Amino acid sequence: MTEPKRRIMLISWKWRDFKKGGKVITNHLLQELNWDPEDNNIAKFKDVLFDEFIVCDPLPNGEKRPVKPESRVVRTSIGDEKHPVDLVAFGFLKSLVELYGDHDVELFVFLHRKDGFGDQEVKDILGNVKVSNCFLIGEGRDYIYYDRNRMQGLLGDHGRFIHNTARVDKPEIKVADTKKKQVFQPHFDKVWNYYKFEFYTKILELKEDLMTYLFIWEKDDKSAKRTEFREYLMADEKLYQRVNNFIGNSSLLLNGGEGKKLSDYESEDHKSYAFDDCRINLAKTENIDQEYDEVSKLLSSVFLNHGRKKSEAPIKVRKMLKQMNSKFNKLLKAFTPNT
Amino acid sequence: MDVKDTYLLFINILDRSNDHSVQKEHLIYAGVKAQTELLPVGPQSLEVNWKFLQQDSLHIDDSNESKKTIKRISNQTYSLDYIEVKDLKNYFRRYFEEGTFANRQQENEYSILKHYFDIDKDHYLSLPIIQFGWVDGIVHIIFKDSDLNALQDRKNWKKLIKLFSVEYEALLINWDLANKNTTWDSILTEDMDYVESKQYEAMTEKNPIFKELNFKEYYRNAGNYYRQRLKSNYILLKAEHRKRAIIAILIDSYAHNISAHSLTVLKWWFQQRATYLDITSIKSKMEREFPFENWGASLTKFLCEKFPGFFSEEDMAEGIKGEAARWYGQLLDKKLEKTPFRAVRDQIFSLSPQLAPLFKYLLEKGAFWSGITRDKHFGGEITNFYDLFWKDFVQNSLYLGTIAYSEGISKLQVHFRIYSGRDFHADEDVYWRVYEIKRDKAGHLLDGEFAKIDIVGKQEQALQNDFLIEGELHEPLKAELESYEVFLPGGVVGKHALFTLIENEIRNVRHYNREDLSKMKKNGLDLIIGIRPSTLSKSFNYTDKSMYKIGIWIGMPSELYDGDDHYVSKRFSKQLEDVITEETHRPKLGGAFQDKICAAMLFNGTFNSVENRNTVRDSYYYPWVRSAFSEGVDLENEEKEMDFEVQNRNKVQADIYLLDKEKNSKKGYIKKYFHIWQGANIYHLQHSGILKEENIARFRLVNVVDGDEHLLREVRSRGIVRVLTNLPLDISWEEAYRAWLSIWVKEKEGRINFLLRHTEVGQLVFDQNAINFYHQEEYLQLPQEEQERYVDYPFFDLGFAHGSSKLSSEVERKVLNIRSDGVLSNKFFQNLPSIEEFDQGTISKRSLYELLEVLQTRICIFDQRIAERLSGQKRAFLNEQLSCGIYGENAKDWENVKVDGLSKYHFIIVHLAFVESYIDKTGKHYGEEGIVRFMDEQIGDQLSDNCILVLTTGRGRERWWKRLQDSKYAYHTTFRPVEMLIDAVESAGLIKDDIDLKYNLIKVLFGS
């Protein structure tokens, strides 16, 4: 029987401890600390530029026992400079990934959008085969952030693990002990399990929501112009934004930029809808980017690529919906069985 | 004399209802209303009889008893011998014998007397009513037989006649001010002359009744008293005239400064702006020459795509054509080439940013005028000079830039000169003063340009003109001015009293000669505002700098002499005059009197105090404005300036000094000085005498040292909300503020969680022992038992959003909208660039207490206009999150709020119109007169030291206060102008900050 893999979350985020200690990694700081990318001795910066929290199981007697297989949260903070991929600081992060990645490790890397991380950086990190997945997080709206309604998550909105005090009617929320550098297992597990299936879940939800919304068109087998489809989809702003984001057109906003962004909907619903880190992860870890692209291409041709003569031709509605359903299913089935 | 049983008076006197012209042929039944109130309640049927007597009059020939008496006294044949107690049955003999009454009066008298008396047994006594040597009528005393002995005694008749005489004469003196009698000289002066004349003396020696009652001696002794009473009447009369004169004088200020100058120009420019382009024909011309398809189609398409559903393509195209035609027309118009460029008239972009402050200013002027009419001001507002001058004054560039437009001046530089409060002994006499100009810590001499206004501009600025720009010394001046706290009595009313004083100075530019005016036209007018921290005069033993001495002048030297008269002396002499003329009591119009009235308001808190000279302080500071001149800053020492200042106590010497024209300077800067109180923290009030000197309304908190009930009332009546008793005299401001909060805040312990989205980032914990703020990390470090104790405290969430989030979603998510330029980041916390950096923020004890006060003060507002400023959703949110309930004036909401109890609020703010129109249980409106009944029935005993009713209106009404001031509610009722409350909501709305909204309201309500 194969040993279960060790689990590690490497989170590059706006950790207050690093900020307060002046240890937010920038090119300048690394230069000051004489970090040499070739040196291969990154471990010496532990507890300076990064640190580790052990995931523990809090027992009823108050004891905290490390879980098995061993799990950790590694914290680091990369400065909010643009295009980190071009920076030496990003090299440090890659070395850190190298340090923690191993054949017996499942490594999830989380990158803070607000610090300039985007799909380029995700692609770069995923270039290291030891990385299982790489996720973009930010603005308090992703699953890794604690949410009062679902009562799950690890991060607060203020650069720390969430720690809300007890009240008469509510218990204390404490996911970590910062002094002892421990993260508590139930909270860790919930987040871990979510991210393990995040992309599958997101795609499935988009497919279900979209097909349900378009179902009304299927009742009689008519032809329709693509512009009609587009206008119909635009009537549901959120769904329109999600489809756009899936395709990769995240910059397209309604109302000339005055309307809500996808991130506003995410904040309101306490849910992540963005696919900005999805395709790259699927390409690197699942090798199913082709399936993804097929769906994307179809959605794009139906809802977006207008203006060309060809696209003005009416399309058979029922046929198109069947095709859409089939391509989504193909993509979902392509995920490895345990996800 | 001891009358034990019921008695009744029928007083038949000459009719004086028609002002000074007494109806000598008719007698009326006087005092009927009082009679009906004093007598035991009779049957309803008597109302008709009383009403008849009240409304009817009796011709003197129809009144046997009265006619005889009056004639006999006039003929000098009446004596006590004619007086006798008579029987009622004799009076009504005709009725008993013939069944008819002598007249209808008697018939009605009979019905009344029959109820209260036994006509067969009871009696009456008729006595003359004598006033100042004349007879005005007869009083008939109807009494029971049981009191016969007392009223049969001849000695008592003398006493009674005297008593009635004294009472009646007192009423006459009051009558002298009734109706139109105030419009001419007192008629009673003649009467007094008569009773002190030889003629009267001779009469009293002959006329038996006057002799018997010793009336000759009486007026000899009491004459002085009566003269004094008449003099008081005259003073009251003048005060009334003055009140009206003040209104007239300040309306004239509007007519002059605003209407005649500023609005005249603005109206003309805007009229041209509105009409000189014929958009329709330009559109046609453009369509002919440059078809819209060629240049506008893509723009239309672009906008329609960007804003789907906003407009149809046709409407969008029409809008673009219209706007383009305006641009095209303005750019092409030959007027631009032929007439000088006028930024207001010719600017292509919208002028909304410039118009908004003008409208605000005009709105506040409305509040100012209603304040003048009301002239009862409850407290005021503590603000700082920077906010006052920068945000409220100079922003109004359209107005300030046009006040002097009739002299061709449209550029204005506002210049501040800050003097240190140091005292320098002048080399010469009492009228020379040496002032030191202050330097800030960085070494800047605080004497320079604060703001520049130019409303004409240049043609190249036609797209967007900066009407107002910061002056060279703006930043150092800003820092200094922000540190000067100033008290404005009546809030917006005091503010505009100050602005009127400044505006008048700008108007004074017309006195300059043509050459100087031409320089100012070119370079702009320098308006200089001098500020010097100052103490109340040394004669009052004050050592703290409690006031600012404000100087206003134009930065251009002018001629000091007009012939042989010195302008400074002349101006001051004028200001020493009463604001009304001596003979006709007409208002004296003009800037000097406007200045005097406004300066009196700033110093005393009321306009009507303008001629007060009763106290030592008032006579020292009267006429509230001082006249001065200087030759400018010392050329050899830029930190020094010497002023020649004329005030009440040195006027004579100063005039003599200035007579010597040869010796004195011929040119200089003519200044005016007045005082304005500093805002301050705490005052320990020990006795009422101090109220004549100190302005206690300027303090944030007043401690009545021995808790004296009378003093507490006095303090409250000045609109001060934070009132405490028995605090130690050496208490610090922080400790006093905490003591206040322990009484004011209704929860005696609590914990406010500062939540950034779902994360607690700070805790404000308060209880009877302490008020503390902890960052979350600090809080989690507190001893376990302490944290556990706080777990049981009532908690309140104060949720904040990430700065990048949008307002609509904030409301849905129940988090407050906070902006980095709002009060939370700028005033309460230091080092708090954004809410995400919360753990960097620090808060002082004082700010913490103030924050707690803002957050925990519960408000409910019933005002339609305020409610209209916010959506229903937003109002519900503010009520839930910040205990700030804002409702329209509707009965349903009022009843709902009442269900939970009004006493849970700290401030119940109600528009007077709501009270007036509210319908009581009987279906009637309460009306302004029914304010006390409204309080009885709607609010009852819920008001307390931490539950205050605030009435608000934009009108100058005062009857409600006259009704309330003697009621039990007066102590916990105050007033705020509605314009201030609206502005509090609007200005927070502009920066979209919820804490600002609550903070602004609290500031208006507390005054600080």
Image (cartoon, helix red, strand yellow):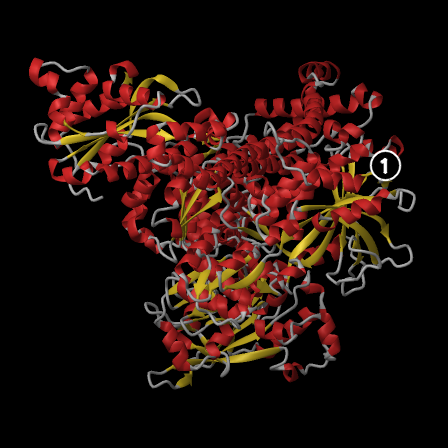
Q: Mark 1 — residue?
A: B564
Position in image of residue B784 (x %, y %): 41, 81
Where B237 falls versus B750 (above or below)? Answer: above
Kindly identify the residue that appears in the image at 41 percent across and 79 percent down: B786
Viewer-closest of B329 and B653: B653
Q: Count the labels in the image.
A: 1
**Residue B44, picture quadrant:** top left
Which of the 4 image quadrants contains residue B365? top right
Q: Is residue B763 above or below residue B142?
A: below
- The quarter of the image holding the C terminus of chain B is bottom right
Q: Residue at x 58, y 75 (%)?
A: A17
Q: Residue at x 47, y 75 (%)?
A: B779
Q: Amino acid at mark 1?
A: Asp
Q: Residues within 10 Å of mark 1 (few under 14, many from 20)?
A: few
Residue B867 in view here: no
Image quarter where the N terminus of chain B lies is: top left
Where is residue B102 drawn, in percent x and y?
A: 17, 15
